[in-house]
Image (cartoon, coloured by chain):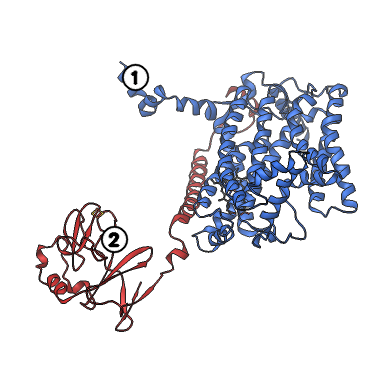
Chain colours: A red, B blue
Amino acid sequence: MKELNTTTKNKPTSIDEEKRDFLFITTTGLAIAGGGAFAWSMIDTMNPSKDVLALSTTEVDLSPLEEGQSLTVMWRGKPIFIRHRSESEISSADNVSVEDLPHKESDESRVKNPKWLVVVGVCSHLGCVPLGQKIGDNKGEYGGWFCPCHGSHYDTSGRIRKGPAPLNLEIPPYEFVSDDIIRIG
Amino acid sequence: MDNQENKKVGVTGWIDKRLPVFTFINHNLRDYPTPKNLNYFWNFGSLAGITLVIMIVTGILLAMQYTANTDIAFDSVERIMRDVNNGWLLRYIHMNGASMFFIIVYIHMFRGLYYGSYKYPREILWMLGVVILLLMMATAFMGYVLPWGQMSFWGATVITNLFSAFPVIGDYIVTFLWGGFSVDNPTLSRFFVLHYLLPFAIVGVVALHLVALHQFGSNNPTGVDVKSSGDTIPFHPYYTVKDYFGLGVFLIVYAALVFFAPNFLGHPDNYIPANPLQTPAHIVPEWYFLPFYAILRAVPDKLTGVLLMFAAVLVLFLLPWLDKHKVRSATFRPFYKQFYWLFFINCIVLGWVGAMPAEGVYVLIARIASVYYFSFFLIIMPLLSRFEKVSELLPSSISAAVLSKKFDKDVNESYAK
Ligand code: HEM
Ligand code: FES
């Protein structure tokens, strides 16, 4: 420090603290704002891109499905379970007291047409695909689906009845385009 | 007892006692005594380090979106440009970052060449720098192949074919590099893997570069050794602030390029997908390779051309032994200084002819410039080492140099009054 003073002898010796604080705060503030904007725009590249977001819609023709049969289609990389339910499956789903269910939803609120159940085939526990779509599959104790990963049982409305999963199978957004055709997404 | 001691210095103290990271930072970035007369050319080392970090960060993010397969590589890059959030920004930062990196490193090297920073005791420091340059060249070359455009493909073909110049083993080397009989999918996959790997090798060599630097500290514009603590100031805050200011200026230039002229330094042909059946009419490498490319084309013989091109970089390794003059800084070497500036212009000329068609007068210019390039190192430097006298103006110490400047100024000012 001493050496410095020899070369700055004729400069003002008092330091303008206020000016320093101002410079320090504006510089740091700008650096944080700029760095933050840069960091965010870079991190944002990892979010779903436009081609991924472009809502893929899937149209499904239901007419070939006989009563009791199931169909699995892909939507946004996930399986969608479509089941043409029989009268007995519908009534068993209806005849449950909603209050007794872990995730309280009536069958009515989960369908647009009671004959057709459309659910996302992803277990709400940790994401496995439950069994029950194919003939001979274990459909669980409630005749719907059974998740083999950690033993979750779903009923004929896709509602969780027993096992570690906390929620019912999710209903994807869909609508009937005509009597026999639905559009998912 | 022990506990009390730790309390005094807090968590940092507790950690530092066991893992002296804070002592390390303090030594190297705070108290670190640095010559007090460094000019702005000493900013370029820290700029290069920051650019390396920017390249690695943007590169890793690009690699998350890129696919190294000849069928989809080009489309995957176009997807980055169109569909990925801010993908255009990410790619333009990486693409132009490569150019900025080379500009910075070339200035950094010309600085060393001017102020004699490669001389005793900094020979290894300099040589590690040349290793970094070689690694950067390999990395940038392979990166340019990844988008799989026409320039990617034909650049890869031409550069790998350089090795076919070697007698007997040449063809085997080329087939080995390609992993096949032409530049194709195996080549692209290995280039991607190496392009990802080499920057981390660069980080390692940079670490060694810094260890070597801090062994003797920075050289300075007078080239005179630090003689006393009066010649130095602590790195922080003096040089942290100066580096920070330089970074701001650098980022303005870099951002201007990214936002206003992102393809200025690139070649439009690289937006045409690679076509192995058609070579573009005029194929040129990226600008930072042009001087070396000019040397390659100046020589009519294939093998000699290739050897001279490699020699143009490798000769830099010998610099500490070619220039044995006692004075470091060109400021105090009137003759060296002139040859130095001629050499600088000569490099620009080489870069310029490298971009011109290899015909007519351009070939002649390329030949003259190539001859001067090598003469500067192999003839002029050794001769000057022997015959250039040590200038009387050479200051006895850094402080003496700083003070005499100050003195002159003060005297002038007081006379003016
Ligand atoms: C030493 C630092 C580096 C240099 C000099 C460098 C240079 C380059 C160059 C010149 C390109 C071609 C730009 C274009 O035409 O699009 C490129 C592309 C690419 N680089 Fe790097 N790079 C470096 C570090 C990295 C790192 C660390 C990674 C990943 C870990 C990476 C990943 C990529 C990818 C995926 C591409 C292709 C995408 C594209 O073409 O935009 N780079 N690099
Ligand atoms: S994932 Fe279905 S039960 Fe665990």
Q: Is residue B185 visible?
A: yes
Task: Indicate the position of residue A144 as horizontal and vertical percent values.
Answer: 19, 65
Residue B169: quadrant of the picture: top right
Q: Name which residue lies at 25% across and 58% down.
A: A124
Q: Does the beta carbon at disc 1 come under 8 Å from ligand 1?
A: no
Q: Does the beta carbon at disc 2 come under 8 Å from ligand 2?
A: no
Q: Name which residue lies at 81% across and 24% down.
A: B393
Q: Say which of B323 and A161 sits in front.
A: A161
Task: Indicate the position of residue B156 as horizontal and vertical percent values.
Answer: 68, 50
Q: Would you name the residue on which mark 1 appears?
A: B5
Mark 1, chain letter? B
Q: Give the vertical position of A82 relative to B399 (above or below).
A: below
| Mark 1 element type | helix
Rendering quadrant holding ligand 2: bottom left
Q: Give the vertical position of A132 relative to A36 (above or below).
A: below
| Labels in figure, total | 2
Task: Indicate the position of residue A152 as horizontal and vertical percent values.
Answer: 20, 56
Q: Residue furthest front?
A: A136
Q: Would you name the residue on which mark 2 appears?
A: A122
Q: Say which of A148 and B406 sits in front.
A: A148
Task: Indicate the position of residue B263 as horizontal and vertical percent values.
Answer: 66, 58
In-image side of B292 versus A173 (left or right): right
Q: Is residue B253 visible?
A: no
Q: Give the vertical position of B321 relative to B134 (above or below).
A: above
Q: Name which residue lies at 64% across and 55% down.
A: B257
Residue type, numbered disc 1: Glu
Mark 2, chain letter? A
Q: Residue furthest bottom?
A: A178
Residue B45: quadrant of the picture: top right
Residue type, numbered disc 2: Val
Label drawn at residue B317: none
